[in-house]
Amino acid sequence: MPTVILLRHGRTTANAGGILAGWTPGVQLDEAGTAQVSAVGERLAKIPLAAIVSSPLERCRQTAEAVAAGRGLEVRDDDRLGEARYGDWTGRAIKELVKEPLWKVVQQHPSAAVFPGPEGEGLADTQARAVAAVRSWNASLAPDAVWLACSHGDVIKAILADALGLHLDQFQRIVVDPASISVVTYTETRPFVLRVNDTGGDVSALVPPPRKRRRRTASSDAVVGGGAGATV
């Protein structure tokens, strides 16, 4: 029953400037973003992570490395967790993009949205590769592993929509802020979404219980009535 902590990168200069960065190289965390990732690194310091996997883009690498500091874990890149390929939209101001006809498609029918230009991809393709990455890493790690994937807002929203059983056309209902964590546990028959857009507070419930207290086979059943919650 692997658990993935989905971490969005901290705020960047492009975020602050209202620019759609996409795969533009060299986009760095700004001062606020640096403070955000330092804080999230401290929040997650006591979580024993089996792996830290990141989008190869600088802003995610900076964020993932803040979590990896002092752990002796190497941050591993996975292009499948990289930003949506926005094609000709890359580097443009959001205030300009809202005037494009495609903007309404992205908002109302994102499963049909394909970004323009030879390097543009469809949001459905973004979701497919990102979900495949999570499933692949789940399969490669121990069944009770907790691991971290550092990625981008739209990518994480797409993964969460899949975990929630939502059509991609509903993914704009999900909010994923900079340096937030969202948490999904994957069982044999279904994922359980434990947290979404969590930007502060205690994370001790994410620490796996001692091995002797774990059930041999994790149940895929939801507790009728909601259960008693996590115990520490």
Image: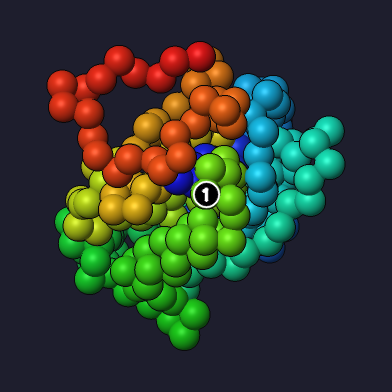
Against 48, is 58 above or below?
below
- Colour pattern: rainbow
Name the image quarter holding residue 126.
Answer: bottom left
Against 209, is 78 above or below?
below
User: Which residue is depicted at the point 71% across and 57% down?
Assistant: 76
Decide if residue 16 is in sight here: no
User: Which residue is depicted at the point 65% across and 39% down?
Assistant: 49
User: Which residue is depicted at the point 44% across and 15% down?
Assistant: 231
Image x and y of residue 20, in percent: 49, 55
Q: In this view, does 41 lie to the left or right of 160?
A: right
Q: Element under label 1?
A: loop
Q: Is residue 153 left or right of residue 137?
A: left
Against 218, is 194 above or below?
above
Quadrant of the rendering where the N terminus is positioned: top left
Which residue in the rendered view is the most extreme toward the bottom? Answer: 118
Image x and y of residue 121, in percent: 41, 75
Three-letter code for the amino acid on which mark 1 is drawn? Pro
Q: In this view, does 167 lie to the left or right of 13?
A: left
Decide if residue 2 is in sight here: yes
Front residue (pair 222, 70): 222
Image x and y of residue 24, in percent: 62, 63
Residue bearing the label numbered 1 = 143
Image x and y of residue 225, in percent: 15, 21
Front residue (pair 88, 6): 6
Front residue (pair 96, 59): 59
Estimate how packed mark 1 is, as few (under 14), some (14 to 19) or many (20 or more) residues with alpha carbons within 10 Å: some
Total tally of numbered discs in the picture? 1
